[in-house]
Amino acid sequence: MSGSHDHVGPGAGVLDGLVTAVLDADGTVLRWSRAAAELVGFEAREVCGHPVREFVAEGGDPGALFGRVRLKRRGGGGIEVDYRIFPLADCDEGLVVAAPVRGFDDRALGASMVRALFAQDAIGASVHGLDLSLLRANGFPAMLGAPAVRPGSRLRDILVAEDAEDIEESLRQVLESGEPLVGNELRIRSRWAPDRERFFRMSAVRLEDEQGRPAGAAAVFTYPTRQRRARSHLDLLREAAIKVGSSLDVQRTAQDLAESVCPELGDLGAVDLAEAVLTGDEPPQWSGGGDLHMRTVASATGEFPGRIRPGEALPPFPDHADLRNLQRGETLAMTREEFETALDDPELVEMLAPKEWHSVVIAPLFARGFVLGNLQVWRVTDPDPFTREDIDLVTQIASQGALAIDNARRYTREHRAAVALQQRLLPRATTDTPAAETAGLYRPAGGGAEIGGDWFDAIPLPSLRLALVVGDVAGHGLHATATMGRLRAAIHTLADLEPDPGELLTRVDALVQRLAHEAPAELRDTVSATCLYAVYDPVTCQCAFASAGQLIPVVLRPDGTRQDIRIAPGPPLGVGGMPFEVSTVDVEPGSLVALYTKGMVAGDGRDLDEGLSLLTDSLSAHVRRHTPLDSMGAAVLGDLGLKPGREDVTLLLARTRAVPGDHIAHWEFPADLTMVGKAREKITRQLAEWGLDELAFTTELVVSELVTNAVRYAGGPVSLRLIREDVLVCEVTDPSNTQPRLRRARTTDEGGRGLFLVAQLTTRWGCRYGQTGKTIWTEQPLDAKDVD
């Protein structure tokens, strides 16, 4: 608080020595004017926070609202003063006005009081004319970071228009009614710092001339009490706790932390984080200067201190005691001079600090033994230095923020590991087979959700067929991803045995039940999955579907029109006891088959029917535009506007193909061993037509062995089929369900070498079963020149 000897008019100096102070309800001194310090010799720092009785001579009673007491003076002695206490509304404070005992008249007393009020720099005072223009003001504008005002100015010249209008409206009521305004709480923001809010209590009275006519209004502005500021700090700490940590994204959490300290505690808030934290790893333990591997990641206002831009690495730091203290978890509060001295490098200061500032608090983000980064609060336009309470509050907010950032870091690490595992477990995104061209798309869940257990697969089967699979394991995290990997491996193994789709899902269902039984008790209820398994045959152009709780696929003809697919989905895998029906449909070559999981159609709060309709429309448009299959998935995601949500997004697209009719040859023979020769003749003739004479000898041996075994052990009729594509497929079908077995015959055995020869002469062979028999198939490679 300051004193001044400026005169306010005739006779203004009559009452030199008028002093003021502010007391709380217990008589503790909260404010102490410079004039009071000059009168008794005790400075404000010696008086504020102490009971006023300590400065009153023995026998005095300062508890009355008015009276006379003797004040102690430094060095001994005392001085008698007359005083009066003016209670302030809505709080327990009182404004004390006192003057040394001597002969005062009313005019002199009033002039002295005016001079005392205008001498304060912690109590604002202003005088307004009838038009509410400013006739005089003390240092009140400076308290808001605004320049001094000239007589005739208006409040809107220094304050935000909304706040200026509120004050002027209150002053108008005082002028019109003559009723004083006491302790009205206001929010005040200057035009030079509109984001910096200050709260004051305003008291105002009407000024009258000697005839009692209104002449203007006078206003006094006081800060809230220390207790109120403490309550505000608690409110700010509570708000920060609610805001910071609502996200599991590291950068979003850092941004929330920076915003939680501005504008209440400073003009600029920023957060720096260790590079390792941004990728989910633990930061190294640093001690001393050098390259700290830190990056600036967040700012409350979008403006960053110094020349460092978002995401840029901080420059190396010189070793300094303050830096080491920060690395040990201590909060630093520094003036500009102290900051510049610590860095001892003007270029470094320019890179790190705002252009104009006077104080900063830097709090380490210390969690679980690691310094993750730091929180900075800079004061630029706010002229007040940081108090001990401010520093403690920044420290507490940084402590809360550090835990939230560390939680986000640990989630990032687990999410990254799960995504990496998921990607390694998934197949190639695209395949190209005689049956179809395929392209798969997988996007993990976002928005704080853990990685899920979605997968897709395109599995080449014998006889040029292709299996298409999409599935979704219940739950999220590494557990779901691991379960997905086991199911995918099981389906691959079962697919090689070539059961129909319903039989395959039945066996996988039994596996899921076993996995649930093996899981810990707390996880058994969550071990389940949905799956759609389809097999497309390019020879017959038919596709067989079976679903275990999965959504119906979309099939679009080459012209983009939708083909209705009727599938009766069975229960999810793991339920057990229910069959899985197989639906077989004809699919026109060049059609698009789309398999997808729930996240593809149920994102952004859409219901399934709406999402399916949007997906179908988008796919249909891209079919008509002939969009390449490998880019169609991303284009569809863009059309749907799907944002990362709580569900994984999986889409498998297949554009079907057909084996040309002249690439297929088919014969049937009765159960007669004499037919074996005829079968060889037909094979030789057909291979010659195809220009594959070099395969005739090998193929004759294979056909001879397979047809002979079929006639001898299975009966008739025997069906023989050749398919020519990128491989030569030979199939022999008989009515028996007996399992053929490959064995090594002994030298004394007369038979048993047929299948052994077949296995040696072909690259692959196998057996699949139908409803009325089995088919033994073989494959032989073709040279590129033999493939049209």
Image (cartoon, rainbow, N blue to C red):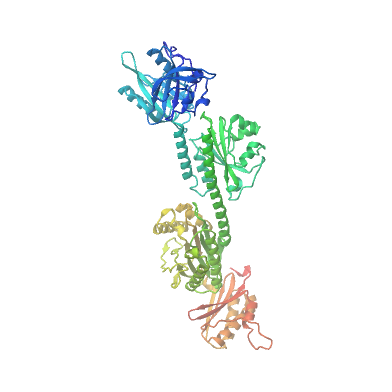
Total label count? 0
- Res 601 quadrant in image: bottom left
- Residue most toward the front? 59
Query: Which quadrant does the C terminus fall into?
Result: bottom right
- Res 376 quadrant in image: top right
Q: Nearer the viewer, residue 692 or 328?
A: 328
The residue lying at 50 percent from left, 43 percent from top is 256
Q: Nearer the viewer, residue 125 or 82?
A: 82
Residue 507 position in % (x across, y down): 50, 72
Classify 547 as above or below 135: below
The residue lying at 52 percent from left, 26 percent from top is 45
- Residue most toward the right? 747
Decide if residue 273 is in sight here.
no
The residue lying at 51 percent from left, 42 percent from top is 257
Q: In the visual, does 76 lie left or right of 579?
A: right
Residue 504 position in % (x across, y down): 50, 72
Q: Nearer the viewer, residue 224 or 593?
A: 224
Q: Nearer the viewer, residue 409 or 72?
A: 72
